[in-house]
Image (cartoon, coloured by chain):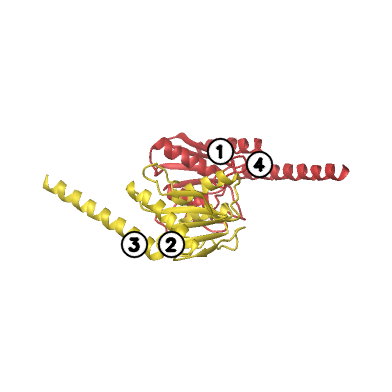
Chain colours: A yellow, B red
Amino acid sequence: MTREEKYMKAAIREAKKAWALGEVPIGCVIVYEDKIIGRGYNRRMVDHSALAHAEIAAIKKACKRMGDWRLEECELYVTLEPCPMCAGAIVQARIPKVYIGSMNPKAGCAGSVLNLLDEKRFNHQVETEEGLLGEECSMMLKEFFKELREKRKKKKEEKAGE
Amino acid sequence: MTREEKYMKAAIREAKKAWALGEVPIGCVIVYEDKIIGRGYNRRMVDHSALAHAEIAAIKKACKRMGDWRLEECELYVTLEPCPMCAGAIVQARIPKVYIGSMNPKAGCAGSVLNLLDEKRFNHQVETEEGLLGEECSMMLKEFFKELREKRKKKKEEKAGE
């Protein structure tokens, strides 16, 4: 396993914490000098917060740990392509490098819908690498949504049978 | 004064709290059923956090107050056009209407550099109104930066005189 795969594995472990709560499994870690300094996973429903995405949680912790709003020598690993908010937060934090598991054609802002990470008119651009453990990240989401559909179907059938 | 101007005035008061801390004066309030349910101002330097923008703080508080990640019946008032992160957060929170004081040609994502608030490929679009107390919001920033330049110049002169 490469060092990059090792960190994406750590992001996948974060995503699985979200899954255990019934949340869409998305996870993120931030690495500085080969140490994880911020972790996060999707907690939107349990926290009742639009801001509770994996990347936001990880950036918050990393900034606190570094005592700086700039994460200029850090790498971010995330299992799913960032949404506009999270891509914007990555730019705000001046993170130079982002590793992405699977892409998100519906809302991804690292190239799918838009590319906020490489927008020349902003004052910071981010290098990205797509598809790191992409198959594993993508399968995790597919499994989650399959399970969700089955649960909903079962619930509907139970209701109909009442 | 219209009700909208009254809320923008409240956002300007938030911005002045940032100014008092030496931060770029940007403020925000979120309104639900004619009550302010979230306030925030820029605290990026004092909080050492890339996330500590006015809108993020206000959205966090409003979600907490509403017990919901959706702010579907709220209005957001902000003194400066949102950056990509904050525009993305507004979309994530499903806020339907945003009032903007002054525009930000360098990084604004409600029409200046990009328009994330009215991107048809996202699952939510936001109605915006620009220039609400625009002159006052714009002058506040100009005054802040003028003061900052003078402080820096004075410091430089003091250093040269040592």
The residue singled out by tag 1 in the image is B11
Distance in Å between CA atoms under marks 3 and 1: 45 Å
The residue singled out by tag 4 in the image is B140
Pointer 2: residues within 10 angstroms few (<14), some, or many (20+)? many
Chain at numbered mark 3: A
Dot 3 and dot 4 within a common chain: no
Foreground: disc 3 or disc 4: 3
Distance in Å between CA atoms under marks 1 and 4: 12 Å
Dot 1 and dot 2 within a common chain: no
The residue singled out by tag 3 in the image is A139
Residue closest to the far left: A161
Label 2 sits on what residue type? Gly
Q: Position of residue B17 (x, y in %)?
A: 61, 35
Dot 3 and dot 2 within a common chain: yes
Distance in Å between CA atoms under marks 3 and 4: 51 Å
Question: Which residue is at the front of the view, A109 or A140?
Answer: A140
Element at badge 4?
helix
Chain at numbered mark 2: A
Element at badge 3?
helix
Pointer 1: residues within 10 angstroms few (<14), some, or many (20+)? many
The residue singled out by tag 2 in the image is A101
Above or below: residue A3 compared with residue A92: below
Element at badge 1?
helix
Distance in Å between CA atoms under marks 1 and 2: 39 Å
